[in-house]
Image (cartoon, helix red, strand yellow):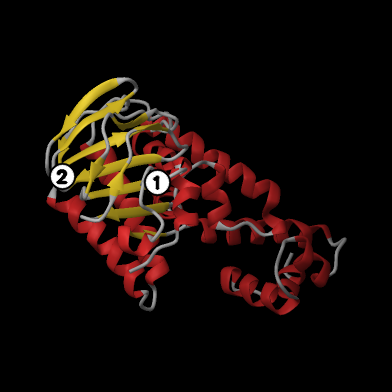
Amino acid sequence: MSVDMEKVMNLAGPIPFTNIGNPKVVVENFCSNDIAIVNTNKTTNISHGTHAHNSYEFDICRAPMPSTTIDNKVHDKPSNSLFAINPIQEHGLMAAIEGFSLCGIHVDKCMVQQVADAIYGSPNIVFFNDSFIVTHDINLLVNLFLEELRYKQVGHEFLVENLSLLLVGNFIRHIKHNLPAKPHNKPNVLKESIKKAIDYMNENYAAGVSCTELAQLIRMDKYSFIRIFKKQTNETPYEYLIELKIEKAKKMLRSNKYTITEISMACGFSSHSHFTSTFKKRTGLSPTGYRLNL
């Protein structure tokens, strides 16, 4: 069993449990950088009253959950239902519950908005508070996420990152929200985002630019960014950046004003030898050979 209430509270805020004195008995929780999953059990007592937090919350009810209030509206959530709560949305119980089985999934606001932006071309997603039946896919993804964090086998960080994206994507698909089902402007939005990334690469190629940095710049997850970038340019971001550096180097070689070492440094290569080997691989000539053949 894993319990780190500090990590949970960083995403979820104050936890409305009345008997949290021994958290290992009351709850089981697992946390990545962006998601905290909290499982309650028959020993958990949830207090009445409302609270709010900055994260998106997705709740899976393992048993009926009566008299749930969200923004002063009362909902009765049936067993095996899924519902969402938006950031800063007041919610809670009208009466305390003892021994209630609930799976609460708290997701960092920025992550949900990045996935919404990648799918719909807009980060401004607001979920309705209706109840939906939990699908087999969502249950499977939650269980896989928990298994990876429970056993922490080799490569679990990579798998957790990707499972997080799949889980949030499935929530967005399954739970009703305000964004249009068929965003007609999505291709244009994606094209503009990739152009923004390319412009940034042109301005910062010498300083070293990572895929993570570029993805964050345009509010997209790294793997979606790489896929969309390649679809639009026929090159990965890394390939594009190397080609950009080679073209800058060719221009400097043609000017005859700089040494090979100066050019390698100005174009952001890690060393003279790295520049020479990369240049020759791309052009068939060494930098010196290229200059001599001008």
Q: What's the residue type where badge 1 is placed?
A: Val
Q: Quadrant of residue 144?
A: bottom left
Q: What's the residue type where badge 2 is placed?
A: Val
Between residue 248 and residue 222, name the one nearer to us. 222
Between residue 162 and residue 46, name the one nearer to us. 46
Q: Quadrant of residue 289?
A: bottom right
**Residue plotted at (24% across, 36% down):** 83
**Residue plotted at (62% across, 72% down):** 278
Between residue 15 and residue 149, name the one nearer to us. 15
Return the mark for residue 134: 2
Residue 179, horizontal then vertical, whole percent: 32, 26
261 relative position to 114: left or right = right
Residue 201, horizontal then vertical, whole percent: 63, 49
Q: Residues within 10 Å of mark 1 (few under 14, many from 20)?
A: many
Give the Cα distance between marks 1 and 2.
17 Å
Q: Which residue is mark 1?
A: 107
